[in-house]
Image: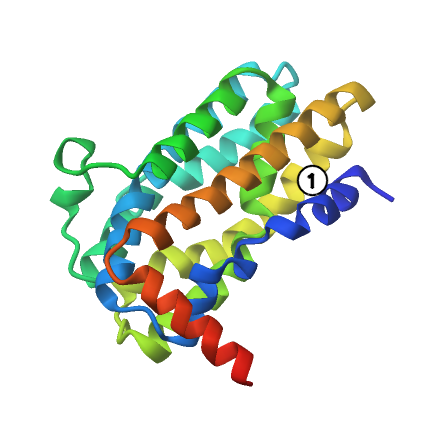
Amino acid sequence: MLFSDVLTQKLAPYHLLKHPFYQAWNAGTLKRESLAYYAQQYAGHVQAFPRYLSAIHTQCEDLASRQVLLGNLVDEEQGSENHPTLWAQFADSLGMPAERLKPTNMIRYPQTQALIDTFFDLTQNGYASGLGALYAYEHQTPAVAETKLKGLKQHYGVQDKAGLQFFEVHAKADVWHTAEVAGLLNALTPAEQARAEKGAVTAAKALWGFLDGIVELAPGAKEAVAAAMANAEQV
C-alpha cells in the first residue's frame, strides 16, 4: 500500500465532515450569524495558506517537486479570483464584510490562532512536515466543499456565484492537488514519511480544534450543534 493511502487511513478519525459543526451545517440547524462568524475566523487560515505553500516550496530541493508546489501556489494567489478574495466573497454573502476579515478589525478565537500558528510551524520547520500538513488539509477538501455547497444552497439561501465560488473551485482543484501532493509524499524516504505523518496528524487535529472553537464561541453555534445531534439521535 502506498504511503499516501496509509496516511489517509490514519487521518480518517479527524475528517472534518465528522465534526459536529459541519454536521449541523449539513442538517441546516445553524443560523446564518454562526456561519458568518465561522467565515470571519477561518479567513485568517485562508489568507495565510499561500504563505504555508511558499514555505514548503522554499524548503524543497527538487525542481520537479517545486514546480508541483508552485502550480498549487499560483492557483491560490494569482489574479483577481485568488482564493482569499473568493473567501471574502463567501463571507460577504453571509453578511460579514471584507473589512471585518482583517486581523486588525477582529479578535481571533484562541483555537483560530492555534490553527494558523500550527500550520506556520509545520510548514516552516521542514519540507516533510509541511507536506504532511498540506495533505491533511487538501485530501479532504473536495468532499468538504461539495457538502458545504449543498448545505449553503438548501438551508442558508446562498445561491449567487460570488458566495459559492470558493467551494466550487476547491471541489474541483483540490482533487488533482491532492493527487500531486500524494505523489510527493510517496517519493519521500521512510524517515521523511515519518515526519510527514506526524505533521499531517498535528495539522488535522488543529483543523478539528478550530471547529471546536467555533462551536464554543461563535454566536448560536453550540445550540445549533446540540439541535443537530438531537435530531440525528431520533432518526
Nearer to me, 47 or 211: 211
Q: Looking at the picture, how far across and down is residue 167, in whole percent?
A: 41, 59
Mark yes or no: residue 3 visible.
Answer: yes
Give x and y (percent) for residue 190: 82, 23
Which residue bears the numbered disc 1?
182
* Label 1 secondary element: helix
Residue sitting at x 54%, y 60%: 17
Quarter in which the N terminus is drawn: top right
Residue 222 image point, x, y percent:
34, 61
**Residue ID at (57%, 52%):** 140
Q: What colour scheme was applied to this rendering of the protein?
A: rainbow
Q: Which amino acid does the dot numbered 1 rest on?
A: Ala
Left or right of residue 181: residue 168: left
Say above or below: 232 vs 138: below
Quadrant of the rendering where the C terminus is positioned: bottom right
Q: Position of residue 90 (x, y in %)?
A: 27, 57
Numbered-mark total: 1
Q: In which quarter of the image is residue 52?
A: top left
Q: Is residue 150 visible?
A: no
Tag 1: Cα neighbours inside 10 Å, few (<14), some, or many (≥20)? many
Q: Which residue is drawn at 23% across and 57% down?
A: 219
- Residue 153 is left or right of residue 127, and the answer is left
Q: Looking at the image, is 195 positioned above or below residue 12?
A: above
Q: Nearer the viewer, residue 55 or 201?
A: 201
Q: Identify the image quadrant of residue 78.
A: top left
Above or below, comparing residue 145 to residue 228 in the picture: above
The residue located at (26%, 76%) in the rendering is 157
Residue 171 in the figure: left or right of residue 4: left
Please tell me which residue lies in front, 182 or 32: 32
